[in-house]
Image (cartoon, rainbow, N blue to C red):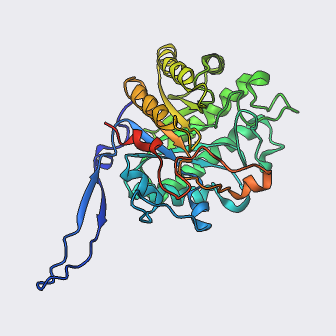
Amino acid sequence: MKNIIGKAVLLASALLFSVTGTSCSDDNNATPEQEQTYDMTGFAKGADVSWLTEMERGGIKFYDANGKATECMKLLRSIGTNSIRLRVWVNPDGGWCGKDDVVIKAWRAQQLGYRIMIDFHYSDTWADPAHQTVPAAWTNYTFDEMKRAVSAHTTDVLEALKARGVTNVEWVQIGNETRDGMLWNDANTAVTGRVSKNAANFAAYVNAGYDAVKAVYPQAKVVVHIDEGNNIGRYTWIFNELKNNNGKWDVIGMSLYPEDDNWKELTDNCLANIKALSKQYNCNVVISEIGMAWNSDQAEPIMKKMVKGCKAISTCEGVFYWEPEVYNGWRPANYETLGWGAYTKGAFDNNGKPTAALNAFGAE
């Protein structure tokens, strides 16, 4: 399922114009504009920058290696990134990562030639292995109403993107880190999408999202995303349950967050699992999220190993770094509300410059 976006779009090189100063010589000839091209095709070297607009609103700036302030997505593109991932919440406080915010970021990404992954959480806030909270407006829905809500929300966001002219949607995640399903409503097992309580419901909700994606972006690949890419048991359990309940997906998404003391084992296992799962389920795999401590000496070798290893596997579509742009203790508003500390696994240093972790995206 390679090259799903029209070649005319993907092969169009993104251009970066940097205007140099006017010459002080007698002829006053200006130095010509320098044009740089970027290959945005092939293996996805991606970044989830969902916090970007909130950071910009707070005055956060980003700098290249020479200390020049540069728009974040342009900066990431200049060091090898070719794909952007953006999460979607249903009705978030403040609007960050809601539909309108996502459309703005996706449109900006497309102007730079990026391919795009849209990540539906189906929640008003964070959906992850420990939290899959039903959106407040959907709390009392029946099973059929929940399916319709998944479909309607998916359709609404994707149609808004399409109406804005965003055509580079290559992947769409139905759920985020759905280790035990999504849309948990454990008080009502007839409705809950928690797999350990009602696997058929989870499959039905995934299918509702899948069908909605294909109706708006027929060539987009639908991703079902699980955490701990090193733990194959998490994957075989959930995907067997989906398969047994006629669930539909195109690509398996993985998260991997190594630490200094376990990264060699975790990355070895993850690379082996990509091969095994691709074979078992006859589908491709993508690393939807990866991250490590921003100041770790192991961050660069970890990323180089994963990018090189994933590129060597024909069924791996790419690697997305999760929120690399975060630096110097910045926290989003909802982290403060939740009492959480700053995210420390970005890939920018405390001066707002990319770290060596992202060198892997520029390597051949």
Which residue corresponds to the image point at 52% horizontal and 37% vertical from the top-left?
297
Count the marks: how many? 0
How far from the left and from the top, in percent, is residue 153? Answer: 64, 48
Which residue corresponds to the image point at 76% horizontal and 28% vertical from the top-left?
194
Which residue corresponds to the image point at 48% horizontal and 47% vertical from the top-left?
355
Which residue corresponds to the image point at 77% horizontal and 22% vertical from the top-left?
196
Q: Can residue 217 be seen in this view?
A: no
| Residue lying farthest to the bottom in this orientation | 26
| Residue lying farthest to the right in this orientation | 187
How far from the left and from the top, in percent, is residue 171? Answer: 48, 39
How far from the left and from the top, in percent, is residue 79? Answer: 38, 49
Q: Is residue 353 visible?
A: yes
The quarter of the picture where the C terminus appears is: top left
Would you place residue 157 above or below residue 279 in this image? Answer: below
The quarter of the picture where the N terminus appears is: top left
Foreground pick, 307 / 135: 307
Q: In this view, does 326 lie to the left or right of 79?
A: right
| Residue lying farthest to the left in this orientation | 27
Q: Is residue 335 left or right of residue 13?
A: right
Q: In this view, does 94 lie to the left or right of 24?
A: right
Would you place residue 196 above or below residue 124 in this image? Answer: above
Q: Quadrant of residue 118?
A: top right
How far from the left and from the top, in percent, is residue 8? Answer: 28, 48
Q: Is residue 239 left or right of residue 359?
A: right
Would you place residue 217 above or below residue 181 in this image? Answer: below
